[in-house]
Amino acid sequence: MGIRESRKENPGIAYLCAVSFTLISGVVSVVSKVCTVYGIPVLIVAVRYFLSAAINFGIHHTGLVQVRYRGKGKKEMLVLSGICYSGSYLLQIWGLLYVPSVINGIMMATVPIWTELAARIFLKEKTSILQNIFLLLSAGAVITMLYIGSSDGLRGFDIRGFVLLLGAFLFEALNNIVIRSLKETYSSMEINFVSCLVSLGICSAVLAVQAGTGAVSLTAVLFALKDWRLIGALLFLGIFGTFAAGFLRGYVLQHMSALQASAWYNASTPVAVIAGILFLNEPFYWYQLICGALILAGVIGIQICKEKD
């Protein structure tokens, strides 16, 4: 008999999943840098979704985890989650063509804010004043760290990139709300499987268009796939960065409030800094320590403060 995710509230497991999601997300930021030099971002995203969907399919058919869709409602919300999932990734990689990564990082810090606003509107969730203060502390520390660490500040600002990134992170926030709204109907594994399949289909369609217009060269793709570093990065991004992170995020969103769950996005920033130091030999600066401590203080503060009744 297969194992099914428990619906019973267990704060300990939820926080363990949140910390695991944070650690994986931080390392993903560093591993993604390895892939940027190959110039095939849509293909890389498609491979991530393919690997994640393949793992989900294998787990389902081995009976290790029960995945059931028959007789359940809200299937259109599952598809919407997949659209938001792929839309967030695609708009983000296209936005980075026009703006430096510091702006991407700064705007990513707004995801918990957009998520809180959406949860207030659609899920009627309420937050306390203290939680909002800690949210601003965490987001402000992320923005400060990235701005100070940028060699050219915001001089690379481009309105096209700004609009694309804004759309990307609004998609991310909306997906958080969709996943949370499905908590009584589908498990995080079920949501993750459909999201990856829908996202894979969308990315494949985009790739087909790019191949037809000559934007993607088969020769360049085959040449890139000869590099073992890219293969290793793709395996990590597919297995951990997409499958594991997607499952963990879904579990956290189903067992915490939208604000508490999304706050962990910001905690991945200091993890990315540490990973960059350990694996890419990036330098460490005093402001990173201070901002990292403030980020974690904000995230922890959001967790321990009670929501408004």
Image (cartoon, rainbow, N blue to C red):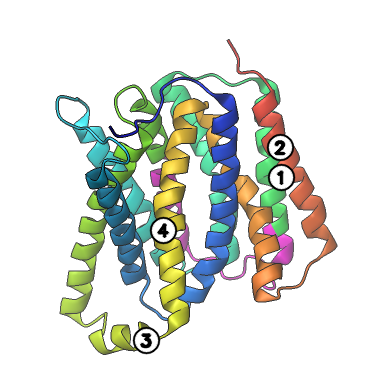
Name the residue that disc number 3 marks: 226
| For residue 220, above or below residue 2 | below
Q: Amino acid at mark 3?
A: Lys
Residue 239 — which label? 4
The residue segment tinted magenta is 146-173
In the shown orientation, is residue 125 left or right of residue 148? left
Residue 163 shows in this picture: no
Name the residue that disc number 1 marks: 295
The residue lying at 54 percent from left, 34 percent from top is 261
Q: Nearer the viewer, mark 2 or mark 4?
A: 4
Name the residue that disc number 2 marks: 298
Magenta highlight on residue 157: yes
| For residue 89, above or below residue 47 | above
User: Which one is in front, 202 or 156?
Assistant: 202
Q: Secondary structure at mark 1?
A: helix
User: Which one is in front, 77 or 243?
Assistant: 243
Q: CA distance from mark 1 to mark 4?
A: 27 Å
Q: Earlier in the sequence, mark 2 or mark 3?
A: 3
The residue lying at 69 percent from left, 25 percent from top is 304
Q: Mark 1: give few (<14), some (14-19) or many (20+) Cα within 10 Å.
A: many
Q: CA distance from mark 1 to mark 2?
A: 5 Å
Q: Amino acid at mark 4?
A: Ile
Q: Position of residue 6 (x, y in %)?
A: 41, 25
Q: CA distance from mark 4 to mark 3?
A: 20 Å
